[in-house]
Amino acid sequence: MTSNVSSAGAVGRTPPLATLTDIVRAEIDLARQLLTTIQNEHAALLEQNADAVNRLGLAKRDLSAALDATGSKRDRLLSEWGFKTGSPGTAALLDQYPDRVLADAWQTLHAVATLCRQENNLVGIAIGKHLMVANQAIQVLKSGARPSEQLYAADGAKTAKTAPQTLAKI
């Protein structure tokens, strides 16, 4: 005779898959909002709109916190049923209790999360570019050289163009 005890520790009961599906759907909604916010932040960076970048950065932080809280709800539910938390636990639950609706929602969440990471990486690149330009401007102010000018000759000596003009005048 087979036992009704699952590896999830529930005797004769199935995990509340509908509840878990609702939580994952809430995560999808938040992740889509986050993706839109990151895309808008990227556009604001390209437009050099500092106010929008700041506002969107705060919105991104709030959405990330909401996503974390919703993910914690999912993890608590998985843990209550004896599964590991996160992706491994959800995968194990789906292996043991196949549910097409939950599986589709889980795949959608992963796809949107991947897009968020990719877009956020682009934002990081844009920020790095702006930082590089700002640092070059600071160097121009400090040395008087233009970034497009060669700073050093082939032998490693400073070029005449990069000699500090202020010191030369003193």
Image (cartoon, helix red, strand yellow):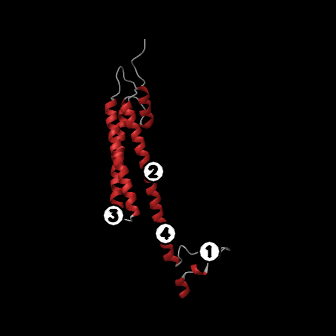
Residue bearing the label numbered 4: 135
Residue 22 showing in the rendered view: yes
Q: Name the residue tied to disc 1.
A: 152
Q: Position of residue 145 (x, y in %)?
A: 54, 77
Q: Which numbered dot is residue 136? A: none
Cα separation between marks 1 and 2: 38 Å
Measure the alpha-carbon separation of dots 4 and 3: 21 Å
141 or 27: nearer the viewer: 27
Q: Disc number at residue 118?
A: 2
Question: Which label lies toward us, 4 or 3?
Answer: 3
Q: Secondary structure at mark 1?
A: loop
Structural distance between the alpha carbons of marks 1 and 3: 39 Å
Marks 3 and 2, the one that precedes in the sequence: 3
In the image, taking residue 51 as reference, residue 147 lies left or right, namely: right
The three-letter code of the residue at mark 2 reads: Gln
Q: Depth-wise, is mark 1 or mark 2 nearer the camera? A: 2
Q: Of the residues shown, which amino acid type is indicated by label 3?
A: Asp
Quadrant into which the N terminus falls: top left
Nearer the observer, 69 or 129: 129
Image point (41%, 30%), residue name: 94
Identify the amino acid type marked 1.
Tyr
Nearer the camera: disc 3 or disc 2: 2
Q: CA distance from mark 4 to mark 2?
A: 26 Å
Residue 126 x %, y %: 45, 60
Q: Earlier in the sequence, mark 4 or mark 3?
A: 3
* Residue in the image at 34% along x and 56% along y: 58
Q: CA distance from mark 3 to mark 2?
A: 23 Å
N-terminal of the pair, mark 1 or mark 4, is: 4
Can you give x and y, in whole percent of width and height, for residue 128 in the image? 47, 61
The x and y percentages for residue 62 are 33, 51
Seen in the picture, residue 98 relative to 117 is either above or below; the reply is above
